[in-house]
Amino acid sequence: MSIADNISTIRERINAAARRAGRDPAEIALMGVTKTLPAETIREAYDAGLRLFGENRVQEFAGKIDALRDLRDAEWHLIGHLQTNKAVKGTELFVAIDSVDSLRLAQKLNTSAIQLGKKLAVLIEINVGGEEAKSGVAPESGELEGLLVAAPKLDHLKFRGLMTVPPFTDDPQQARPYFRKLRESRDRIVVRRLPAVAMDTLSMGMSHDFEVAIEEGSTCVRVGTAIFGERSRAG
C-alpha cells in the first residue's frame, strides 16, 4: 500500500468512526506524525492531500524544514516534549505547540512569540494515566489551573484545547476510559467560560486506537505508523 492509499483508508475509517458516534467527520483532523521521516516522505504525504503534520523534536525538524518550505499550506505542529531552553526555536519553527506541560514553558513561549511578532497556538498536555515517565499536567491539578488562569496575560498564545497520550495497551478499548477522562476535563473547563481559553481541540488517538478516540470526542488524531509504516524505535 502506498502512502496515498494508506491516507485514503484512514480517512474512510475516520468517517466510519464519526458516523458511529453520530458526529460530523469534518470535525476531525488527520495529523500525520512525521518524526524520523525524511523530507521526501513528508512531501509524498503532502502530495496525497495531507496538510497537518506533527513533529516530536525541534532539532530534527530544524534539519529538514528548508527542504519543505515550498509546501506553503502545510501546518507544522510540535507534539513532543519541549524543553524551555528550546522555546525560542520551537516558536520560530512551528505554528502550534501541542504539548505545553507547565506554566514556565507557556511563559517562555509567550515571550518568544512576542519577540517574533506572532501568535502561537497551544494545547495543554494532560497526563491522564498519571505515568511518571510521561509529560503532561495532571487533570484538576494546580499546574493545570495555573495555566488556565494565566492565559489572559499570555496574550501571544492562543489556548485551543487539550492533548493526551494515554497508557499504551494492545487493546484499543482499554484506552477508552482515558480518552473519556480527557473529554470530561475539557467539558469542566468549558463550563467555566474562562477568558482567553478556547477548548475546541481534543488531540487524542494514534494509529492503533484513533477510532475509539473519535468515538470519545477526539477532534484531531495523530497517525504515524498507519500512514508511513513502522519506523526505528530509536527515532
Image (spheres, rainbow, N blue to C red):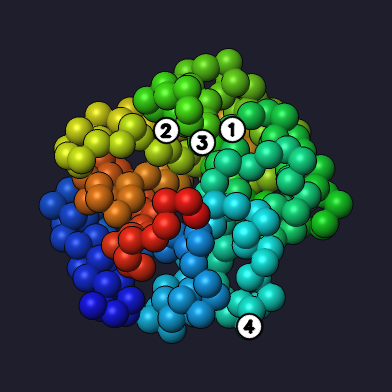
Residue corresponding to mark 3 = 125
Q: Secondary structure at mark 3?
A: strand
36, 185: nearer the viewer = 36
Which quadrant of the figure has residue 45?
bottom left
Residue depicted at x 41% and y 44%: 202
Q: Residue at x 54, y 37 (%)?
A: 124
Mark 4, residue position: 70
Upstream in the sequence, badge 1 or badge 2? Answer: 1
Residue 109 occupies which quadrant of the picture?
top right
Q: How many marks?
A: 4
Mark 4: secondary structure:
loop
Circle 1 residue: 101
| Residue that label 2 marks | 186
Indicate whether 91 appears above or below 47: above
Q: Amino acid at mark 2?
A: Arg
**What secondary structure is found at the residue carrying circle 2?**
helix
The answer to whether residue 14 shows anywhere in this view is yes
**Mark 3 and mark 1: span between their CA atoms?**
5 Å
Of badges 4 and 2, the one in the foreground is: 4
Look at the numbered discs 1 and 2 and tell me whether their residues touch, using CB distance below 8 Å. Answer: no
Q: Amino acid at mark 3?
A: Glu
Q: Amino acid at mark 1?
A: Asp
Q: Nearer the viewer, residue 193 or 165?
A: 165
Q: Pick whichever of labels 3 and 1 is earlier in the sequence.
A: 1
Q: CA distance from mark 3 to mark 4?
A: 30 Å
Residue depth check, mark 2 versus mark 3: number of the one nearer the observer: 3
**Is there a contact, CB below 8 Å, between mark 3 and mark 1?**
yes
Question: Residue 77's spot in the image, x, y percent?
Answer: 56, 57
